[in-house]
Image (spheres, rainbow, N blue to C red):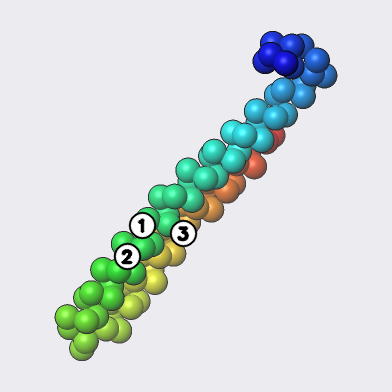
Amino acid sequence: MSVINLLATQDAGELVKGLTAVGRGIVYGGAAIGPGVGIGLVVGNAITAMARQPESAGMVRTTMFLGSAFTEALALFGFVLAFIIAG
């Protein structure tokens, strides 16, 4: 069955719903990749800093948690954007 025949047999609006679902998945998937990489870099560098200077571990840990929270906010923005696309 060709693509044109498949599209011709669709009900009105069915294609739009399907493409909207695909778009939501792409948006949220893309929005989750960046924060995942960012949090990995933040935590890895914080562990390296704590290993090099253990006396400043408290300040580094606090900064690491703040950086992780701000980075995770980007994933939440992407999640909200995926729902906005759905209308």
Q: Residues within 10 Å of mark 2 (few under 14, many from 20)?
A: some
Question: As rendered, which of 72 and 36 lies closer to the eye?
Answer: 36
- Decide: marks 2, 1 in contact (CB < 8 A)? yes
Q: Measured from the top left, where is residue 10 in percent x and y?
A: 79, 18
**In terms of sequence position, does the residue under pointer 2 or pointer 3 come before the other?**
2
The CA span between labels 2 and 3 is: 11 Å
Q: Is residue 56 visible?
A: no
Residue 78 drawn at (x, y percent): 53, 46
Q: Residue at x 69, y 13 (%)?
A: 2
Residue 75 vs residue 62: left or right? right
Q: Is residue 15 above or below residue 64?
A: above
Determine crowd level at label 3: few under 14, some 14-19, many 20+ residues with C-alpha closer than 10 A. Answer: some
Residue farthest toward the left in the current orientation of the protein: 52
Q: Residue 63 versus residue 1: which sits nearer the camera? A: 1
Q: Secondary structure at mark 2?
A: helix
Q: Residue at x 28, y 80 (%)?
A: 59
The residue beneath circle 2 is 42
Q: Is residue 73 visible?
A: yes
The residue to which callout 3 is attached is: 72
Name the residue furthest bottom. 55
Single out the mark in the foreground, 1 or 3.
Answer: 1
The amino acid type of the residue labelled 2 equals: Val
**Is 79 placed above or below 20 here?**
below
Q: Who is closer to the viewer here, 76 or 24? A: 24
Q: Residues within 10 Å of mark 1 (few under 14, many from 20)?
A: some
* Mark 3 secondary-structure assignment: helix
Q: Which residue was labeled with disc 1?
A: 38
Secondary structure, mark 1, is helix
